């Protein structure tokens, strides 16, 4: 991933980031540590869509687990914790 010091952005403005964005996402370094990530709107939308798809896949898997009887129900949180302890 590309990186740029925050001072460089302060000095050159967004043009400094624009040049690097052509090569991919950009870490902004502040106090010698990555502090921010700058990405294009298209890349942001891509990440949001991927996160949404991953969420839907988890929900589908959970529903399939319920349908196939691979889910246990517990009356209380204590009962759940006892079952988890028994698995260890």
Image (spheres, helix red, strand yellow):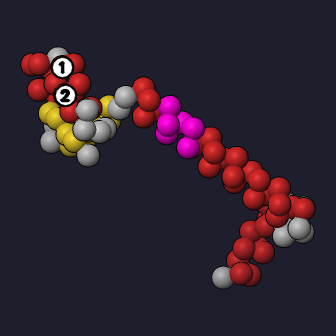
Q: Which image quarter holds the C terminus?
A: bottom right
Q: Quadrant of residue 3?
A: top left
12 sits left or right of 45 in the view? left
Residue carrying label 1: 15
Query: Vertically, is 52 above or below 64?
Result: above
Q: Residue at coordinates 70% horizontally, 46% vertically from top-left?
A: 56
Name the magenta segment's main secondary structure.
helix
> What numbered label is drawn on residue 19?
2
Q: Residue at coordinates 18% horizontally, 19% vertically from top-left?
A: 15
Expressed as whole percent of the image width and height from the top left, the position of residue 74 reads: 87, 64
Expressed as whole percent of the image width and height from the top left, the position of residue 67 reads: 90, 62
Observer-nearest of 81 and 37: 37
Observer-nearest of 68 and 19: 19
Which stretch appears magenta? 45-50
Expressed as whole percent of the image width and height from the top left, the position of residue 81 reads: 74, 68
Q: Residue at coordinates 56% horizontally, 43% vertically from top-left?
A: 50
Q: How many marks?
A: 2
Tell me the crowding category of disc 2: few under 14, some 14 to 19, or many 20 or more residues within 10 angstroms, Cα based: few
Query: Secondary structure beneath disc 2?
Result: helix
Expressed as whole percent of the image width and height from the top left, the position of residue 79 reads: 83, 68
Q: Are marks 1 and 2 in contact (CB under 8 Å)?
A: yes
The residues tagged by marks 1 and 2 sit, at their Cα atoms, a distance apart of 6 Å
Query: Vertically, is 25 above or below 73?
Result: above
Q: Magenta span has 70? A: no
Q: Residue at coordinates 83% horizontally, 56% vertically from top-left?
A: 63
7 sits left or right of 41 in the view? left
Q: Quadrant of residue 73?
A: bottom right
């Amino acid at each position: 991933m590309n990186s740029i010091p925050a001072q460089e952005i302060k000095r050159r403005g967004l043009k400094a980031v624009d040049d690097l964005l052509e090569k991919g996402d950009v870490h902004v370094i502040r106090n010698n540590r990555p502090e921010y990530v700058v990405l294009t709107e298209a890349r942001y939308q891509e990440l949001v869509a991927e996160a949404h798809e991953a969420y839907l896949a988890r929900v589908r898997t959970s529903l399939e687990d319920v349908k196939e009887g691979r889910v246990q129900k517990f009356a209380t949180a204590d009962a759940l914790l006892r079952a988890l302890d028994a698995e260890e």
